[in-house]
Structure formats: structure tokens, C-alpha cells
Amino acid sequence: MNAVPRGKRVWRHALMEARLVLRNGEQLLLALAIPLGLVVAHAAVGQQVGIPREPFIASVIGLGMWSTSFTSLAILTAFERRYGVLERLVATPLRRADLLLGKALAMTMLALGQAVVLVVAGLLTGWSPRPSAGQAAVVVLVVPLALLAFSGLALALAGTASAEVTLGLANLVYLVGAAGGLLLPAANFPAWAQPWLGLLPTTALGESLRTWATGGFDPLPVAVVAVWVVAALALARKVFRWTS
């Protein structure tokens, strides 16, 4: 019997992972709750307190993707590792790289689905982005690369730390990432910090989405997330352990 080609093997694993997460989707619902709450809150009071709608909703969409592809994936994988779920996969044809790619692809697909929900919610509350063609092309590249980078970082954390440590650190990093470039633009920080923030994948995603929503053009985030996705997936492959 011929072995299943690696690409098909990874893809099937990604689809299985996505189905399992959707079957027990409490974590995904939690990941959506905060961004949806922010969209509704902005519709109620955002304009009155002077928060521009277009860049803010774009930031919230980025926050939702960050929550799913980093925080949710790290926590889910850490507890799978703790309870021996991953050990059973050792007996399958999946290699460590296949497992990591499958999980990353699964959460990338789910995060994109959540982004669609947030886009619809934003449009229903009056959001009216005005993207340029050039920036639309930038976003098409940045979003999936950023999600893969977030997934790689999540797997590197979940594959080395205990489930309890991962739970605490994933939520802490979520808050830091939300403040560092996703909800708050780099321009809001001191001048000395802005170049460093610009090197973060969270900032790259947030800035590209805000630029897209307001009609500007900035291709730099593509290079930033391209470097991060290679580094994050390579790190995850190196440090990830199947067992706790």
C-alpha cells in the first residue's frame, strides 16, 4: 500500500483538528466574546468618546484572530499534551512537523472564520472600510502569515511548558499583544518604542488591517510577518514535545 502524500496527510489532520475544535467550541466562543463585545460597545458609545470607527473595528478583527490562533491554540494543545492525547498520535504516520502544521492550519482556518463573523458584525453596526487595491493585496498576504506565526508561537509554548503555566502565560501574552500593536497603534507609544513595536507580528497585523480600513498603503508588515512565520514554526518544531 502506498503511503499517503505528506501534503494530503497534513491537510487531513488539519481538517480533523478543526472538526474536533468546532465540536467542543467553548474556547472559540470565548475567543469571540470579547471582540464582539468591543464591536457592540463601540456602536453604543465609541463615536461619542472620540474613537474612530474604521480603524477601531479593524483592530478588533485582528484581536479576534490573535485570540484564536495564539491563546486558544496554546491552551488546547497544552491540555492535550497533559492528558496524553498527543502521545497516541506518535503511533500514526504523522511526524512532529506534520502535527504542528496541521494544528497551525486548523486554527488559521478557524480564526479566518471568526474574522468573517467580526467583519459582518462591524458592517451591521455601521463600519465602512475604504480599502485601496494595493493594501487589500497586503492584507491577503499578512493575515494568513500572521496567523501561522501566532500558531507557531502558541505551539512552541504549549510544547514546552506545563498546562497550568501555558494557561497563565497564554492569557498574559494575549493581553500584552492586544496592547502592543493590535488595539493600540504603535503611534500611541513613545517614539523610542515605536520601531521595536513595529517588529512584532501583532503590530504588523493590526497596522495592516487599520491601514486597509482607512484607505492607506503600507507593504512593510508583509516582510515582518514573513520573518516571524519562518522563525515561529522552526522554533515550534525544535522545542515541541509530545509528552509532558
Image (cartoon, helix red, strand yellow):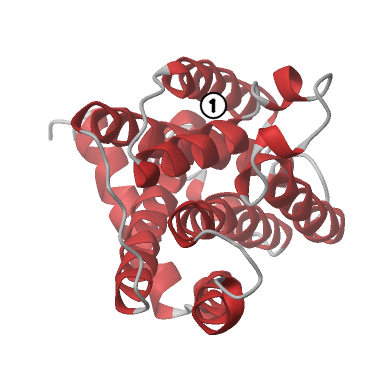
Whether residue 227 is situated above or below residue 101 in the rendered picture: above
How crowded pointer 1 is (Cα within 10 Å; few <14, some 14-19, many 20+) is rated as many
Could you say where residue 133 lies in the image, as x and y percent from the top left? 19, 32
Could you say where residue 213 lies in the image, as x and y percent from the top left? 37, 47
Q: Amino acid at mark 1?
A: Leu
Residue 209 falls in image quadrant: top left
Label total for image: 1
Could you say where residue 104 lies in the image, as x and y percent from the top left? 45, 43
Residue at (71, 27) in percent of width and height: 197
Please give the residue where the numbered disc 1 appears in the rendered image: 233
Q: Is residue 100 visible?
A: no
Residue 142 falls in image quadrant: top left
Q: Nearer the viewer, residue 31 or 202?
A: 202
Could you say where residue 151 lies in the image, as x and y percent from the top left? 54, 42
Residue at (65, 56) in percent of width and height: 71
Whether residue 45 is situated above or below residue 230 in the rendered picture: below
Q: Is residue 106 left or right of residue 63?
A: left
Residue at (26, 43) in percent of width and height: 11
Residue 238 falls in image quadrant: top right
